Amino acid sequence: MATQNRGDVSVPHPTDPNDAEMRSEPTDLDCSGTDFPVCPYCGEVDADFWTDCREVQYDGDETTHDCPSCGKECDVEIQVSYTCTTRKQEPSK
């Protein structure tokens, strides 16, 4: 199984239509902790999710999402994390 880079996320992507893994539902897609929803059925990364999604904004919020590629519906849970950047203060003049 090959890896396909979609945006900032690399997801496994089946390449051989005769491969048994491709005929069955993917089980090895990295769908956890990604910047954008990754379809658990086909691996499509929806980089436009945040543009169209207004109802989820807080940690733990959940919504359903229709994959723009395969059309299947999946559940999306929002996980918010914060980062901090510090720097030295400029000396007073």
Image (tube, grey):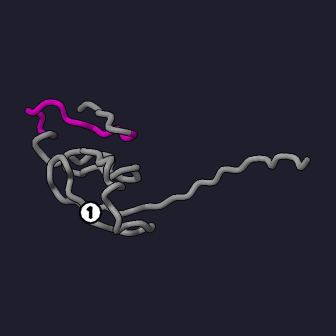
Say left or right for 21 vs 76.
left
SS label for mark 1: strand
Please give the name of the residue rendered at 32% of the width and 61% of the height, measured from the top-left corner.
53
Please give the name of the residue rendered at 18% of the width and 59% of the height, measured from the top-left corner.
73
> Considering the image in quadrants, where does the N terminus appear?
top left
**Which quadrant of the view contains residue 14?**
top left
The residue furthest front is 93
Q: Is residue 74 magenta?
A: no
Say left or right for 39 vs 35.
left
Q: Position of residue 12 (x, y in %)?
A: 28, 38
Q: Position of residue 18 (x, y in %)?
A: 8, 32
The magenta-colored residue range is 8-21
Say left or right for 33 vs 11.
right
Q: Position of residue 85 (x, y in %)?
A: 66, 50
The residue furthest left is 18
Instruction: Note whether 14 is above or below 45 in the view shown.
Output: above
The local crowd at label 1, few if under 14, some if 14 to 19, many if 20 or more residues have their Cα within 10 Å, is few
Q: Position of residue 92 (x, y in %)?
A: 89, 49
Please give the name of the residue rendered at 39% of the width and 50% of the height, measured from the top-left corner.
34
Amino acid type shown at disc 1? Asp
Q: Which residue carries the number 1 mark?
A: 75
Q: Nearer the viewer, residue 69 or 40?
A: 69
Say left or right for 70 vs 75.
left
Please give the name of the residue rendered at 31% of the width and 61% of the height, measured from the top-left corner.
76
